[in-house]
Image (cartoon, rainbow, N blue to C red):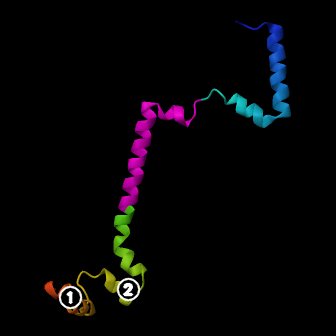
Amino acid sequence: MALSMDEQRILEEMERKLADDDPLLASRLAAFGRPRLGALMRCRRARIALSFLALIVIAAVSLAVYALTPFRASLSGHGSSTSRYCSSPSSRFRACWNSSPRGSALIVRSQ
């Protein structure tokens, strides 16, 4: 049912007065019928785009971690801390391991 010209004029006047008195409420009421994130996520195209974006972000982070792995030892400084990243165990570790009751059954080869 359409409003008469007089009713439309009164309604527009009320809207202007509300926007002047409380602009925050007026902006909330103006955005009342707009689709939000929940409605956008129901859209198949938006879900595919966000999934693709998440996949790209995960791949980029994984690639960055993989690329920075060689620098991990150099960032911790020089000295005994770099020996943690060596592939062969230290002689001190081998001596401690072989002297323990659990380690006696395990033969550790030195390289």
Relative to 59, 6 lies left or right:
right
Q: Read off the residue under disc 2.
A: 81
Q: Is residue 56 magenta?
A: yes
Q: Secondary structure at mark 1?
A: loop
Q: Secondary structure at mark 2?
A: helix
- Dot 2 surroundings within 10 Å: few (below 14), some, or many (20 or more)? few
The structure residue drawn at horizontal position 42% and vertical position 52%, both measured from the top left corner, is 57
Relative to 98, 36 lies left or right:
right
Q: Read off the residue under disc 1.
A: 101
- Dot 1 surroundings within 10 Å: few (below 14), some, or many (20 or more)? few
Asked whether residue 9 appears in the rendered view, the answer is yes
Relative to 57, 98 lies left or right:
left
The structure residue drawn at horizontal position 39% and vertical position 56%, both measured from the top left corner, is 60
Amino acid type, label 1: Pro
The structure residue drawn at horizontal position 82% and vertical position 28%, both measured from the top left corner, is 18
Asked whether residue 109 appears in the rendered view, the answer is no
Q: Nearer the viewer, residue 6 or 104?
A: 104
Magenta residues span 35-63
Of circles 2 and 1, which is in front? 1
Amino acid type, label 2: Ser
> Mark 1 or mark 2, which is nearer the start of the sequence?
2
Q: Nearer the viewer, residue 107 or 7?
A: 107
Q: From mark 2 to mark 1, how far is it between C-alphas?
A: 28 Å
Is the stretch drawn in magenta largely helix, strand or loop?
Answer: helix
Q: Is residue 49 above or below residue 108?
A: above
Residue 59 place in picture, x, y as percent: 36, 54
Placement of the N terminus among the 4 image quadrants: top right
